[in-house]
Image (tube, grey):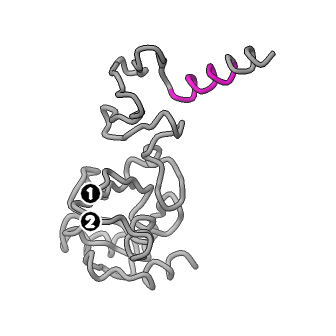
Amino acid sequence: MKKYFLYVITALFLVACGGELDKKEGKHKHEEGTEHSHAKGDESHKHKDGTTHNHSKGKAAADCLHCGMPSAEFPKWKVKVTAKAGDIWYCSPRCMFISTLDKAKAPKEIQAIKVVEYYNTKPIDGKTAYYVTGSDILGPMGHDLVPLKDKAAADDFKKEHKGAKVLKFDEVTMETVKAMVGK
């Protein structure tokens, strides 16, 4: 009975993982057809879309570090923070700011922040982006900071979508974010 239970659990793990894991050789094959080996004790790797996956955790590391939502389900909102320890994903700019503005919880040694620009949906530098607050556009968690590539685009967006403020990265405070959560 225990052996049968172990087989069922292993099958469920493999289905949830989206591939097949050959434990003898440490090989893993994904639905998109990529296959690679893991070093003993290292069960993490990167997918084609840039997300990391850790078989020991059983879920994509692209889940939002702050709220746990799957970032890949929100391609127009997701944020990638590259830190010394690796890539960290957030489902939205709001979750990223909540995390990075809290110095006790913030990722250490941030090297880059990539946000998705609202109009062209391409990744841009989060530190040079402009953010509009208070607009009628909602992110995955409700009211959010909408990233735009430059001041002109941010001003246009603010007018078009009834935004409250246009802020640069360094102007966003925890108070700014908390005001959105209460709406």
Task: Inspect the magenta stretch and tell me whether residue 81 lies in it.
Answer: no
Amino acid at pointer 2:
Glu
Residue annotated with mark 2? 109
Alpha carbon distance from label 2 to label 1: 6 Å
172 or 18, which is in the foreground?
Answer: 18
- Helix, strand or loop at mark 2: loop
Residue lying at 48% horizontally and 19% vertically, measured from the top left: 21
What segment carries the magenta color?
Answer: 8-17
- Tell me where residue 180 appears, x and y as whole percent: 50, 77
Give residue 8's mark. Answer: none
Residue annotated with mark 1? 84
Q: Disc 2, disc 1: CB below 8 Å?
A: yes
Vertical order, 3 against 123 (above or below): above
Point out the image quarter for the N terminus: top right
Q: Residues within 10 Å of mark 2 (few under 14, many from 20)?
A: few
Q: Is residue 136 left or right of residue 166?
A: right
